[in-house]
Structures are given as structure tokens and as C-alpha cells.
Amino acid sequence: MKITFILPKLTRNPTGGGKIVYQYANALASAGHTVEVLHPETLFLWSLRKSWRLKLLSLASDIARLLRGWTRQSTPSVPWMTLHPAVKISIVPALFARYIPNADIVVASLWRTAEYLVTYPACKGEKFYFIQHHEVWSGPERRVNETLKSRTNKIVISGWLRDLVKDLSGDLAHQVPNPVDHEEFFLTSPIADRRPVISMLYSPHTWKGAADGVSALELAKTRVPGMEAILFGTSVRPATLPAWIKYVQNPEKRVLREEIYNASSVYLCPSWSEGWGLPALEAMACGCAIVTSDNGGTRDFVVDGENGIVVAPKAPFALGHALISLLDDSERRISFAARSVELAKSFTLEASVQKLLGALGNKLPAEVRC
């Protein structure tokens, strides 16, 4: 099959959603499929700006990016991801149909790319919408929901997104859970020997709950003075972060595995909403017990009282006391962590690729002409 994936603008920093798509592109190319991943220079988001001044400035920027796309001569690369040699990465000026190659299947991921997807003629491929979140944090809820109601084949990564699509559109979406890269994330440090260290992904997006997480860490620190915390993220160290909390910007894969996940006894996920919550699953594969808010995404792999503790979103006090309860009970923490490792083993790339292929189906080469 000839498959086109459409992602947002190519960035120099890793993104969780982008990583998953690149992993699938690699696996599909290895299986002999022809795979191209497209990134637009612009998505024309000027209409989302709140004032006319900002709309005009954004439109001017969009036009400049479009012109840059027309004149681009350099070969694009993804500096934070190793790609199969057969995977083609392309940067196009915009996502108008004229820039989309003919294919058997075209897969959009992100609500704005899905808006373009529904306009494509049949020669661009059968239309699939890979839904990784309810992206109301990046666009108007009405427009986001319209993409979820669109007449496209829908693939979701989690149970709550499957239910959301069913509620909004009546469609039965294919569910393809995000995998753990077990060649990158695995147990290297004995669970029982770990010090009281808590790890957490830091994101400046409010809905990621970083402020709640830091409050929970500070509360736990008052009860467990020897506790340490290590946060990581793509942004620079936040100025408001307490000095006792360690922060690593853009950790390399080895550092993330060895010096963060495997050095931690508990991983904290304070997000208000998650499409999936891949860092928590990576931490599980590396032997962490989990404390998480009930954010939707982690429901598929964090079982309250079995491998972690689940509390309500936006509840830093409850998160803090959950941390304290695990740090005060080594036997329970070790039991949860051991169960985490076993649960994570079922989320493999091979299993997810087979489910993805099942969703895409075995399409014959497209003969539709534009």
C-alpha cells in the first residue's frame, strides 16, 4: 500500500503524537509499504486569533511560511527520531489537495489537518483520521468536534476517545493503543532498591497539571523530607520551580531511561486530560509505580490499587497524599511497580502495528485519478 501520513509543522523538539506516527511509518516501511510523512509550513490558523490585529499579523506570517514552502530546497529531517531509510519526509507549503500525493490511504492526525482531509478527492487515498486527543486546548470545541463527526474512517488510541467519537458521531472507531518502545524503555535498576524519587513530565500547558504536580510534590516533601523529585520537559527550567526539584531539559533517551525513569520509585502524572499519557507507560516499563489523575488516557493501563493510585483531576492535595502513602509503604510500592512492568509488556509496537493494519485494511492500489 501507498500510505500518506499528515502531521503538523515539523519541530526540532520531540512530540508524543509525532513520535507515535513516525514509529508506525517505520514499521509500515519495514513491512514493504510505501510511506510518506507530510508536514505543512502553515496550517493557516490566523482565524483563531482573538483580535483583528492578531489575525492580520498571523495571516501575514502564514503567507510568509507559504512562500517559504514554495522556495524550500533543503532536505527535511527529524533530528530526534531515527527513521527507516524508505520513509519519505516532505515539507509542503500547505495542506491544499494540490500538495498531497496520490495514495491508497491518507491519514490525518490533529484536528486542523483533519479539516483539510475531508476536502481531498478520492485519488489522494481512503481517508483515515488518527485521533490522539480531544484537542479543545488547541482549537474551538465546535470545530474540533466537527472533525470527530466527519465522514472519515476513525482510529483512536484510547477507550475514552473511542467513547467520545461514538457519542459525537455514532461511529465505531478502531482502537489502536499506543505502544512502548521496549528497545528504549526497560528495567535496569532493581525496584526494591530504589530511593524515594518521584519523576514527572513538566509541560507549560495548563491542562497538563504541572502546577498541581509541583504542589503535590511540595506536600509530600513535608511528610517525607528525604524525598527527591526529577522533572523533565522540552522547555527551559521554569523560574517558579522550587530549587530542591531537579529539572532536565530535552533528556536523551538513555538519560530518560536510566537517570529518570529507572532512578524513580514513583511516576507522577497530574494532567487534567490525556489522550493516552505515554510517559506514564514508559515509566511503568522501567519499574515505576504510578500516581495519576483520572485524565482519561491512563485508564487503559493504570489500574487503581493494582499498579498505581488514581485520584480526581485538579486535586493536588489528593495527589500529594497518594505519593506519601506509597513512599511510606515500600511493600505496596514494590508490588505496584512489579505489576507496572508486567502490564507494560503487553503494549508492544508489533501488536499495535497489527491492529493498525487491521484498521487500514488491505487496500488495492488506488486507480482513481484526480
Image: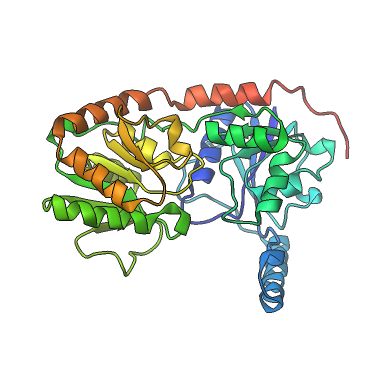
| x and y percentages locating residue 40 in the rendered image | 67, 54
Residue 129 location, quadrant = top right
The one nearer the camera, 344 or 35, is 344
Q: How many numbered marks appear?
A: 0
Question: Residue at the spot x=38%, y=32% of the render?
Answer: 302
Q: Quadrant of the C terminus?
A: top right
Q: Is residue 307 above or below residue 66?
A: above
| x and y percentages locating residue 289 in the rendered image | 27, 35
Can residue 158 be seen?
no
Question: Residue at the spot x=33%, y=52% of the render?
Answer: 316
Q: How is this picture coloured?
A: rainbow
Left or right: 129, with 287 as reference point = right
Which residue in the rendered view is the most extreme toward the bottom?
Answer: 53
Question: Residue at the spot x=19%, y=30% of the render?
Answer: 332
Left or right: 130, with 226 as reference point = right
| x and y percentages locating residue 169 in the rendered image | 72, 36
| x and y percentages locating residue 185 in the rendered image | 34, 35
The one nearer the camera, 53 or 103, is 53
Left or right: 138, with 238 as reference point = right
Question: Residue at the spot x=24%, y=46% of the render?
Answer: 321
Q: Quadrant of the N terminus?
A: top right
